[in-house]
Image (spheres, helix red, strand yellow):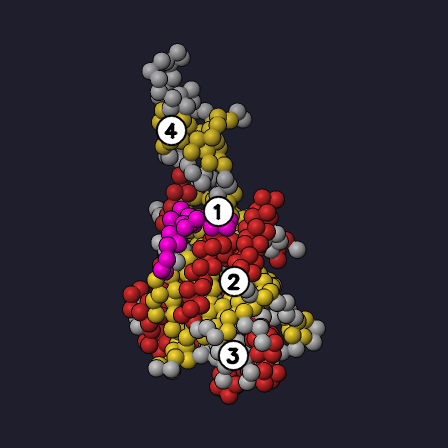
Amino acid sequence: MLNELGLRKRAELIQAIRAFFINREYVEVDTPARLPVVIPEAHNLPVESGDHILQTSPEICMKRVLAETGCRRIFQICKCYRKNERGDRHLPEFTMLEWYRAQSDYNSLMTECEDFIIEVAEAIGRRGYLSYQRTDITLEKPWARITVSDAFSMYSPVSMAQALEENIFDEILCTHIEPRLGMKKPVFLYDYPAELGALARKKTDNPSVAERFEVYVAGLELANGFSELTDPKEQRQRFEQELKSIEHQGRSAGRMPEKFLKSLVNMPEAAGIALGVDRLAMILFDLDTIDKTVLFVPEDL
Amino acid sequence: MYSASDLRKGLKIQIDGEPYVVVDFQFSKPGKGQALYRTKLKNMVTGNQFDRTFRSNDKFEKAPLEERTMQYLYSQGDEFHFMDTKNYEQVVVTQDQLGDDTNFLIDNMEVQVLLFNNNPIGVTLPNFVNLTVTRADPWAKGDTSGSDSKPVTVETGYELQVPPFIEEGDRIQIDTRTGVYMTRVKE
């Protein structure tokens, strides 16, 4: 649990996040957390709330804001809920920062993500470098951008294609690759297998990968971003695949987000990113577990 | 049955007919990926440790373990005989299974015997035992050699360092987890 000093530091961080986006002319939005239908995602278990479901991320509502209001730059800091996620780096209720920017793609978003972490770190007194669990990390730009496929070649005993074939992609990523990412300087991992980014645009010159990236600092995954998929027809097909795989797990598949798909027709080209605020607090305040970044964990309640 | 989300440090499970204790546990979930439960498991019979990663649909059986209070009777070669204090049933535990614990075993001592499928796989001694010193160099009062400890032998044959004032025939308390002298006891 946070003490008074920790509480003040967390509040300072939230203010620094807001300041970054306000300076860049983003509009803060506030979308509903309780939804009648959520994004079909094979690996996120949603929490039910009466006849509604709690958001696993604010993604579909924020994209509708882009599509339906004409706003070009939006951000939101909100609670998200994912059942059964509990560990040193996971809370079943956590604070997410998401931001979306029209007329942008994942490359320019990676650059903005660098600026974001550098500026927020500076605002709370970590100028240009961090120390996390006795590892010194410089924030000097540019940060390395490594394709997922190259990361497998560098760190894994098997290639990305083999890992996918043998259905051990997640295991290899977790045990062989992630612990080595961003130990001296933050790193972007990008170009994920298309099936691991149901809402990301596929690369035009290589449709087997999606324009998706993750940023890692000290082995900790902080954020996930991508060039948004804006084709409603393709989005429907990708959702159908996710729904199938949910059904395959023996869970009830839920409904197709029809209103979102309808709205997608008017959505501008855009890039968006979701960043775990509690994990950012872990990194910036040098805390070894996510429990130390919040006032109460589920076990306290 | 346990499922992967029940995994935590200290949980005892059975895999392929062998009992394991979870000695380290981490929940992981790569972005857009599935939940993974990374563990370090220790085989409770052999002591071997290894890393293993589970998925959320993995299931485990509870290890059929039972702890019973037993009394140490006698040893014969490498075999140590214990008797259940409730039903007088006797079991044999080997020297290998006992390891350093044989240093502290005396007749009639009550211990906890861990059984897996009714076979003994380990013994937990009381944290402290009182043993008689059977051999000690005499202590010359006013000895100024500066040495603050000396070796003695206790009734089980175990040798340890104690303060110089301990003499043959004294009873001393030993921590069975570390094998270290605690205090002299007057009984």
Marks 3 and 2 share the same chain: yes
* Direction from residue A7 to residue A217 in the image, left or right: left
Place residue A55 in its image quadrant.
bottom right
- Please tell me whether residue B42 belongs to the stretch shown in magenta: no
Marks 3/2: CA–CA distance: 19 Å
Label 4 marks a residue whose chain is B
Please name the residue that numbered disc 1 is placed on.
A125
Query: From which residue to which does the magenta span run?
Result: A122-143
- Judging depth in this view, the residue of A107 and A38 nearest the camera is A107
Dot in front, 1 or 3? 3
Residue at x 38% of width, y 82% of height: A204
In the drawing, what numbered circle is on residue B166? none
Upstream in the sequence, badge 1 or badge 3?
Answer: 1
Residue named by callout 2: A24
Residue denoted by label 4: B161
The residue lying furthest to the right in this view is A50
Asked if marks 2 and 4 touch (Cβ < 8 Å), the reply is no
- Position in image of residue B115 (x %, y %): 48, 56
Can you tell which of label 3 and label 2 is closer to the viewer?
Answer: 2
Do tags 2 and 4 sit on the same chain?
Answer: no
Name the chain letter of the residue that bears numbered label 3. Answer: A
- Amino acid type assigned to the residue bearing label 1 in the image: Gly
Q: Secondary structure beneath disc 2? A: loop
Query: Around disc 4, counting alpha carbons within 10 Å, would you say few (fewer than 14), some (14 to 19), or many (20 or more)?
Result: some
Amino acid type for the residue under numbered disc 4: Gln
Q: Which label is found at residue A268?
A: 3
User: Compared to B147, does B15 lie above or below?
Assistant: below
Q: Residue at x 37, y 18 (%)?
A: B138
